[in-house]
Image (cartoon, grey):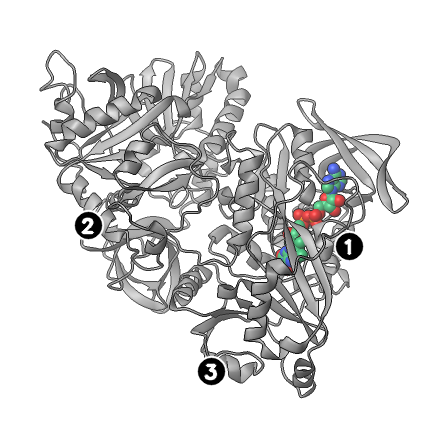
Amino acid sequence: MKTHVKALVVGGGAVGTSIAYHLARAGWDDVMLLERDELTSGSTWHAAGLLPLFNMSFATTHIHQYSVEFYKTLEAETGLNAGFSIVGNLRMAQTKARMDEYMLYATTAETCGVPYEWMTPAQMKDRWPLLRTDDLEGAIFHPTDGYINPADVTMAMAKGARQRGVVIERKWQVDAYEWTGSEWRVTLTKMVEKGGNLVASDEQQVITAEHVVTATGNHAQRTANLLGIKIPAIPVEHQFIVTEPDPALVEYRKNGGAEHPVLRDADAKWYVREERGGWILGPYERGAPARFQYGVPDSFRADLFPLDLERIEEEYMSMIHRLPTSETVGLKDDFNGPICYTPDGNPLVGPAPGLRNMWLAEGFSFGITAAGGTGYYLAQMMVEGEAEIDMASLDPKRYGSWMTTDYAVAKNEEAYEHVFILHHPDEEREAARPLRTSPAYDRQAARGAQFGQVNGWERPNYYAPAGFDDHAARSFRRGGWWQYAVDEAKAIREGVGLIDATAFTKHVVKGPGATAFLDWFTCNKLPKVGRINLTYALTAAGTTRTEYTIVRRGEDDYYLVSAGAWTAYDGDFLRKAAEDKAGEFGYIEIQDVTTQYGVFAIAGPKTREVLNAVIRDADPATALSNKRFPWLSARRIELGMCPVDAIRVAYTGELGWELHHPIEMQNYLFDLLMRAGEAHGLKLVGARAQNWLRQEKSYRAFGTELGRDATPQEADLPRFIDLGKEFHGKEAMLEKGIRSTCCTLLIDGPQDADPWGREALYLNGEKVGRLTSGGYSVAFGKSIGMGYLPPELAVEGTKVEVKMLNQLWPAMVTCDSPYDPKNETIRKDG
Ligand SMILES: Cc1cc2nc3c(=O)[nH]c(=O)nc-3n(C[C@H](O)[C@H](O)[C@H](O)COP(=O)(O)OP(=O)(O)OC[C@H]3O[C@@H](n4cnc5c(N)ncnc54)[C@H](O)[C@@H]3O)c2cc1C
């Protein structure tokens, strides 16, 4: 056995095998794939093999789309037939809301080049007469996907990998990882058969590897323990049943009837496909329990759990309703296996938190569908430094150190149960909440806050009268909450509003090396002491890794504020970069102070009047004047008895301050501001109104306009890039040029809907770009969005069209910051 490799992939399921294949295809010629048992002996062997393209996420849709196309090429490359039946995939809708969901999905699919067709109930009945369609609204049909044999596709990828030089070792289990400072020392144990069990022998082996990828499926908890990290990948039971042949189906096929596509009755929570004249029913039922949260027992090999028919009775009955001929058909087989989940249902793909050259590919619930694309994009990240799509939404560090086993269990069970719910874009999931609350949570709740969850934090989305039901208010169009968000947005434009921004990520960077480090780490000029700037840390590929507001508190003392959703993601990058550069720049101290400071953002033309009433200063009337507290500066002030690090910025684009305060004094400050604000109509404002307001100012948001697929130049932020200095990623950014450009659009859309930021943009019938954000503008009285267009189109006055609700609606590119383009209100003196 080889004892040193460039890359060691652990886990020979569909995912690990694809990663090994793609690393070799990307040019790494020294790759080993390790499997403790046989290839495909994990979850892969019992998967139903469906390859659904449907996905609301841009990154995941790309991954699934790649897989479907890639699997079609495998036979030509390897000579092995992966058993790909391209029967298409029919998603039926029982309700108008479900059709709305499909229309939103369809426009996202268009941004990724995924083909689809609409079908009426009559068209379905005509094509597949066994289907009951009289109670359906319609369906979306994907002609290019279908199902595959999971073991065969894995074996084909394994053969392709071997042909490209990958060494595959079976019956070796990884039992220890040790980072030497330059490579991983991986200890393996030879596994042997004993009485039908797989047991560890005394034989051990050490392999060193520059890079390790773990793709250990249901064994993710053991992997987490070996690595000393938390991984929220915990399996849930998933069953499917296989019926005896259905005589009506057999007859239909005998008479030349086309094979049924994979059927999905989303409102009934199941998929069905043909299997040797019978049917496979796969329900996503309520009550499926999480398993193996502390590891897979040694006794569980390629095993299954007992069938729980009672749990899936409702779905079973609804299959009979939809396919009436299945009523008299008996059951032939059943599978109840562990299917790995994560709290949001997306896999964990990317660098492991805190570790070097350790890559995770864990938590796959659609692992057969995702394996091909995951291999392709992860190999790009490892070999080239970045993938061509932004993989942040799959990054393992989207959960922080607050994540526990109980949390993962509750959320993973919920993610499973939610597979077929209506995926409202304004959905907030209920499990494991409230968990992380700022002190003012109860006060906000008492005032009608309807909370959303970001990175575990409860954050008000909007405020509504007592008894309001957020769940019933959700919609693909303007939800029942829409008017409240309009009123809140208007309060900030016309009066004064208070937003809880406590979830912001906050890091202190200080020490003798801090200034040189941050100057290299970020692309804008560093601010002077007492001032702030907006800046970007780039990836090695020149794209945007993180957006920071940097406050310079002292010569070598900085306070960095970044997006609340990304604390661990930002912290990991910052710490690793600082470690790398400490030798060159000197000692750099990094502290994550996120949970030490609360943040209230107060904004609106009447902001000064509210703050002047509570500020303690020798001359309170001038304390917040432009002279003493200019725009883009930071100062310690005292509001009543609360020391506040105030920053004069407002993400809403109105006169305002961010009030960073000791978290333990938050309730005191909240009460003080609410009392002082009463006379001025101070309104509590949630994240939804804020999101609309920032689009009126063309403020890019991290995770939508800003990410690892576009450079800050493409995000059209030249004023925040200092090309006169050297910074990380600069050369790569310049080399990339401008492939597409971020712009803001005003949209004459439907009367009852706004874009969500996933819609395709068209010009003369041709797709030319996509929206990344969307919403409603109170300043312009119409829909607004931000997105990317080819540079020649991203200029003020260009007319394009937005695809919403299956129609094209006129949109026009506006100037940057269409509301108050000269920043007069934000800079107003007083
Ligand atoms: C009933 C059922 C139906 C499903 N149907 C579908 C479907 O239709 N479509 C779809 O896309 N997905 C489906 N899935 C999900 C799919 O099975 C999984 O997402 C997929 O198999 C995950 O692949 P993987 O490679 O990540 O994990 P696995 O296939 O579990 O592979 C992990 C491998 O790692 C090995 N390993 C673990 N630890 C170590 C170690 N320390 N050293 C060496 N080797 C190690 C294991 O032995 C195992 O072989 C289904 C799942 C179930 C339960």
Local packing at callout 1 (Cα closer than 10 Å; few below 14, some 14-19, many 20+) is many
Q: Position of residue 797 (x, y in %)?
A: 23, 56
Q: Nearer the viewer, mark 3 or mark 2?
A: 3
Find disc 1 in the rendering and name its residue: 159
Quadrant of the rendered image containing residue 79: bottom right
Q: Position of residue 274 (x, y in %)?
A: 66, 72
> What's the amino acid at mark 3?
Ala
Question: In the picture, which quadrant includes the N terminus?
Answer: top right
Dots 1, 3 in contact, CB < 8 A: no
Give the secondary structure at mark 1: helix
Q: Residues within 10 Å of mark 2 (few under 14, many from 20)?
A: many
Q: CA distance from mark 1 to mark 3?
A: 45 Å
Residue for badge 3: 122
Q: Is residue 423 left or right of residue 781?
A: right
User: Which secondary structure, mark 2?
Assistant: loop
Q: Which residue is mark 2?
A: 778
Disc 2/disc 1 C-alpha distance (Å): 58 Å
Check the image and name the residue furthest to the bottom: 255
The residue positioned 45% from the left and 15% from the top of the image is: 513
Amino acid type, callout 1:
Lys
Note whether residue 741 is visible.
yes
Q: Are marks 2 and 1 in contact (CB under 8 Å)?
A: no
Disc 1 residue: CB within 8 Å of ligand 1: no
Q: Which mark is residue 762?
A: none
| Left or right of residue 694: residue 168 | right
Q: Amino acid at mark 2?
A: Val
Pair 2/1: label in front: 2
| Disc 2 within 8 angstroms of ligand 1 (CB) | no
Ligand 1 within 8 angstroms of badge 3 C-beta: no
Which of the two labelled residues, at mark 1 and mark 3, occupies the earlier sequence position? 3
Q: Secondary structure at mark 3?
A: helix
Q: Quadrant of residue 476?
A: bottom left
